[in-house]
Image: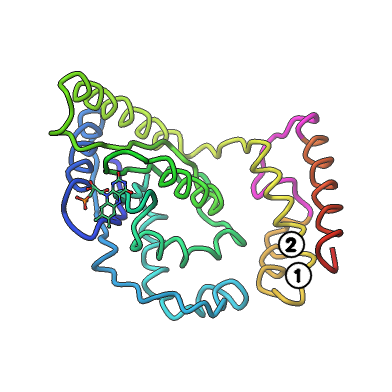
């Protein structure tokens, strides 16, 4: 039985919830899933006050730390996580954006390595920004982007497009289930991910006095001596390319910022 966690960014049980029920039913046809839905509206995170304490002093210093660590432990227990949000103003809802803000410290100190995440949206269209924002965050937290599905208002579609949506649900459910089944194997990082690792490595070192929490974390994890967050075989060509790109990034940073 697969444990599925859904983080619901819609303030109501509307179209996005309907889409979730359909996806869940498609997943169940492949393999049984046990779903828990966390409604961000009920989680009632207060506004981020911009204190930076999560980043600079540690996530346990955040004024919403209890709620956030509870959610993260649920994510850790789940085989897969669905981030659900309708399109609001061509982006995620404010509820979802607030969560992304609270998890910003994970860009500095990623923790969700290999966890499969799936993006589920509803709206008239314009899903591009929604999924771009979700995917970028998930990958920066260390997670694996297992796919996405934007669901237009079903009743307003022509039969031809309804059929397309039906097929999409089945296809995407298969894709997400496959990712959940493979989540024990950590994925090979792409060039972009290797590059980001090097940029965060550079930042952690340069900002060791202004951000001792990052520096301590990177030191304790041994990241300064590593090519990536976890052991993985990286081909020599990729290694050389990343080193070259990292050197270019550093030289650019030197021109703009002090201490680099
Ligand atoms: C404040 C607000 C902004 C919206 N902005 C967009 C938008 O930019 N693009 C779009 O396609 N739909 C937009 N919509 C429509 C919703 O995305 C759509 O109705 C969605 O299915 C609602 O999901 P829900 O029923 O779970 O609330 C907006 C709706 C609201 C309430």
- Asked whether disc 1 touches disc 2, contact meaning CB atoms under 8 Å apart, the reply is yes
For the residue pair 61 and 8, the one nearer the viewer reads as 8
Residue density around tag 2, few if under 14, some if 14–19, many if 20 or more, within 10 Å: some
Q: In this view, does 69 lie to the left or right of 154?
A: right
Is residue 50 rendered to the left or right of residue 56?
left
Q: Nearer the viewer, residue 236 or 22?
A: 22
Quadrant location of the C terminus?
A: bottom right
Residue drawn at the location 77% of the way across and 57% of the way down? 224
- What residue is rendered at 24% in x and 41% in y? 33
Secondary structure category for the residue under label 2 = helix
Which residue occupies 37% across, 41% down?
Answer: 127
At which x and y percent is residue 158?
A: 17, 23
Report which quarter residue 222 is drawn in: bottom right
Ligand 1 within 8 Å, label 1 CB: no
Could you tell me which secondary element the residue under label 1 belongs to? loop
Instruction: Indicate whether 244 appears above or below 97.
Output: above
Q: Distance between the residues labelled 1 and 2?
A: 6 Å
| Majority SS type along the magenta span | loop
What's the mark number on residue 182? Answer: none
Magenta range is: 225-238
Which of the 4 image quarters holds residue 43? bottom left
Q: Residue 180, image x and y in percent?
A: 39, 37
- Residue 77 lies, with reference to residue 101, above or below; the image says above
Most extreme residue toward the front is: 89
Q: Is residue 135 left or right of residue 1?
A: right
Q: Is residue 167 a member of the stretch shown in magenta?
A: no
Residue at the disc numbered 1: 207
| Position of the N terminus by quadrant | top left
Residue at the image position 19 percent from the left and 25 percent from the top:
162
Residue that badge 2 annotates: 203
Pointer 1 local density, CA inside 10 Å: few below 14, some 14–19, many at least 20? some
Give x and y (percent) for residue 230.
64, 47
């Amino acid at each position: 039985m697969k444990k599925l966690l859904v983080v619901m960014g819609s303030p109501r049980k509307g179209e996005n919830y309907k889409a979730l029920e359909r996806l869940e039913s498609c997943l169940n046809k492949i393999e049984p899933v046990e779903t828990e839905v966390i409604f961000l509206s009920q989680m009632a995170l207060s506004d981020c006050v911009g204190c930076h304490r999560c980043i600079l002093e540690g996530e346990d210093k955040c004024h919403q730390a209890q709620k956030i660590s509870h959610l993260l432990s649920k994510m850790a227990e789940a085989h897969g996580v669905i981030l659900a949000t309708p399109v609001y103003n061509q982006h995620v809802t404010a509820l979802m954006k607030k969560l992304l803000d609270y998890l910003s410290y994970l860009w500095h100190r990623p923790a969700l390595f290999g966890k499969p995440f799936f993006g589920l949206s509803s709206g008239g269209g314009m899903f591009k920004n929604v999924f771009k924002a979700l995917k970028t965050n998930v990958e920066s937290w260390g997670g694996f982007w297992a796919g996405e599905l934007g669901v237009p208002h079903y009743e307003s579609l022509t039969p031809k497009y309804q059929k397309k949506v039906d097929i999409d649900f089945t296809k995407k459910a298969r894709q997400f289930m496959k990712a959940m089944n493979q989540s024990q194997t950590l994925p090979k990082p792409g060039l972009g991910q290797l590059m980001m690792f090097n940029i965060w490595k550079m930042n952690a070192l340069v900002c060791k006095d202004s951000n001792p929490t990052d520096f301590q974390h990177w030191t304790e994890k041994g990241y300064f001596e590593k090519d990536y967050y976890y052991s993985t075989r990286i081909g020599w060509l990729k290694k050389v390319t990343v080193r070259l790109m990292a050197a270019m990034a550093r030289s650019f940073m030197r021109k703009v910022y002090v201490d680099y």
